Amino acid sequence: MNDKYERQMKKGVLDMLVLRLLKSEPKYGYQIIQELKEKSEETFLLKDGTLYPILYRLEDDKLVVSKWSEAEGKQVPRKYYEITEAGQKALDEILAVWKRISDGISKIMED
């Protein structure tokens, strides 16, 4: 039963986390998966099948854009995702909502 609640809670914050990771620089999918894993101390262990639908949705919503890198030597081309100005604005709004919700949860849980 704990897995069910954990999955639901994680699902609600993935867009925010992906946008936040893209805030500093463009990244490719595997890089995002690795950073989520490392920075969250393995709380977020995403698979390709979870991440890419999120990236495609964010791209459809014009919050990120993607472009392919050029192949250099033995390196294969990679699709990099970059946050847009609209994505930065959305991230700011999401963070404000997150803060309000987490503050409200903290007040309830302190009782």
Image (cartoon, helix red, strand yellow):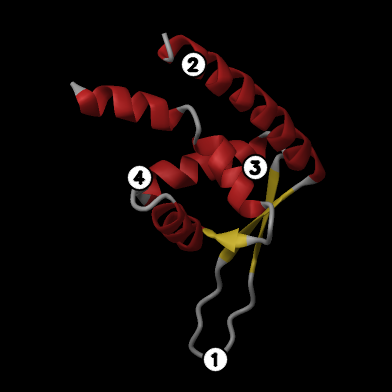
Residue type indicated by callout 1 = Gly
Picture quadrant of residue 67: bottom right
- x, y percentage for residue 106? 49, 19
Up-down relation of residue 57 to residue 102 (above or below):
below
Picture quadrant of residue 6: top left
Q: Quadrant of the N terminus?
A: top left
Q: CA distance from mark 2 to mark 1?
A: 51 Å
Residue at the (76%, 47%) spot, across then down:
84
Mark 3 or mark 2, earlier in chain: 3
Q: Residue furthest bottom?
A: 73
- Disc 2 on helix, strand or loop? helix
Q: CA distance from mark 4 to mark 1?
A: 35 Å
Mark 4 or mark 1, earlier in chain: 4
Task: Classify mark 4: residues with Cα within 10 Å, few (<14), some (14-19) or many (20+).
Answer: few
Q: Between residues 23 and 68, which one lies in front from this camera angle? A: 23
Foreground mark, 2 or 1? Answer: 2
